[in-house]
Structures are given as structure tokens and as C-alpha cells.
Amino acid sequence: MRSACAWVSERATLVRIEAGRIEEYAAELEAAGEGQSDPDPADPVTDVGDADREARAAFAVCLNAINFGSGWWPTIRKRPGHSGFFTVAAGVAERFRERGPWTAAELEGIDAAAVAAVLGQDLEHPLMEQFAASLRDVGAHVGTDHAASFARLADDGDGSAPALADLLAGWAAFADVSDYEGRPVPFFKRAQLAAADLGRSAVVALTGLDRLTAFADNLLPQVLRVDGLLRLDPALEAEIEAGRLLEHGSPGEVELRACAVHAVELLAAAPAGGLSPAQLDQLLWNRGRARRYKALPRPRCRTTAY
């Protein structure tokens, strides 16, 4: 992932990393102190921390299996005061608290109607069937490959965050590879995030969390763009500012994600740094929830990758 994103960054024509800003920006992030204590962006509505290990593992995997749809967020029914992601997370958390976690068998038979009921959304919304398909894939893999146990799945990574992410990346539910000039560019945003969340929720002790890359979505490039670390071709910037959807796999969309990942790698390696790429990702994701970043149109793409 690192080498592919660096390769794209070297060839990118629509997105450019402001290399001269790296050290200054790394120092700014370090001084801000955000992310040092690994803060949890979740609110109490999405908390299942009191659940047992199996339920916490199921929550981390199931939520990340459907942690996509940002291009659709303006069209879903949001809970008051909640973003699209937190609306989905709150629905899943309530289901877990009230009825227990989904079992692998339940997930294998889940349909769009069941997902819509849990999330409080219209059955006809395209995301509902996409979410259901992803959850069915999770149920099939957990049931067949991991003794129908999400905790067993977490253990089958042998204590390695990269190995666990690699395991999940092989599932259709977590597929996330783009093509750029004929070369596959893996991102695996949700597979890596699921592995990190399994570690953060104390489901399993994981080594190698510092070897994960940033979790490339549309918010990370937005924060780096607003903060002046990414410079965009005027035509691409105009598309974003006009609120037009980007095509998944298009050069501009791939460059946005790849350059954001590589920029975070450069920030992590800067002398003024001190945070891992995953820690920087969480810091920047939290930063992106501020009004300054939400007030401006962000890149949007209707994809199951993010």
C-alpha cells in the first residue's frame, strides 16, 4: 500500500503534496496534542464498551463492513446532531445493546429490509442492499473460516494488526483496490480500520499498529486540502467545490486518496513528528469534524470503499 501510494504520488498530475509544508505541519499537529492520548471520536450513543469480548469483536467488524457510503450521506435520514457515519453507527450499537450482536448465521441471511429497520432508513435506498451484501459476506466468512466466532477471527490474526487487516482485505466485504495507469493500488481503508478498532476496543492485543497506513477516505484529503498540504488541479477543485460526484477509480479520485496516504507517511517520518500514520489519521479525522472543514464542499464518491 505504501509503495503503491508513493508511486501514484510521484506521477500525479491532478493532486500535489506541498512537500515544503511537511515539517511545519507535522510540528503543528504534534504541538496541538490531538491524538496523543488516542481519543475516541465515538459518542455515548455508539458505545458498546460494556459488552463481552465476542460482542465487541462483532461490533468492530460489522460496523466497519458497512463503514462506507459517504457519497450518499446527503441523501440518508440522519439522526439529530449526527453525521451519516454516526447515524449508521448508532443504529448498529442500539441493535447490539437491545438484542445482542448479530451471529454469523443471522448475517448470512440478512437482507436490505432488516438493515433498513436497524438503521432507520428507507428500504429502497441503494445503500441498504449494499450494506446487506457486505454483512452477508462477513457472516459467511466468520461462519466458515472462524468457527462462527468474531473473537476467534480477531485471534486468527496471531496478534498482528497488519496480518489481521490482510486477512480481512481478502473478503469481498472489505475489497478496496483501485487501478492507476495499469497498476493496482490497494487502500484497504476499512480492513485496516477494523483491525485497529479490534485493538482499540481491547478485543485482542495487537502489535504492528504503527505499520498500518492512514485510512484513506474522502475526509482525510479534505482536511489536508483545507490545511494547504494538498494542492489540487483547478478543474478538479472546481468539480469538488460545485458538489459534483467524483467517479470511483478516476485519476483524480485515486490521486486524492493516494496522495493523502503518502502525505501522512511523510508527516509520520518528519523530524517534528512523533505519531504513527494511524494516530495521525485519527487526529486528522477528528479535526475534520470541525466547522472549518465541514463548511466547505468535500470530495464525494459513491463507492463501497469508503
Image: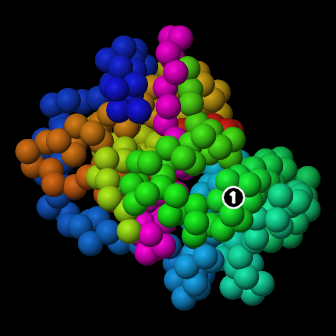
Seen in the picture, residue 106 relative to 271 is either above or below; the reply is below
Q: Does residue 231 appear anywhere in the picture? A: no
Residue at image point 55% right, 79% down: 53
Task: From the viewer's side, name the closer residue of 55 and 189.
Answer: 55
Mark 1, secondary structure of its residue: helix
Seen in the picture, residue 117 relative to 129 is either above or below; the reply is below
Residue at image point 58% right, 61% down: 153
Seen in the picture, residue 176 relative to 112 is either above or below; the reply is above
Image quadrant occupied by the N terminus? top left
* Image spot of residue 199 (x, y percent): 42, 66
The answer to which image quadrant residue 77 occupies is bottom right
Task: From the viewer's side, name the closer residue of 291 and 94.
Answer: 94
* Image spot of residue 214 (x, y percent): 38, 46
Q: Does residue 20 appear anywhere in the picture? A: yes
Q: Mark 1 points at which residue?
A: 142
The answer to which image quadrant residue 255 occupies is top left
Seen in the picture, residue 234 relative to 191 is either above or below; the reply is above
What's the colour scheme? Answer: rainbow
Image quadrant occupied by the C terminus? top right
Q: What residue type is labelled 1?
A: Val
Give the extent of the magenta segment: 180-204
Judge left or right: residue 35 versus residue 43: left
Magenta stretch encompasses residue 183: yes
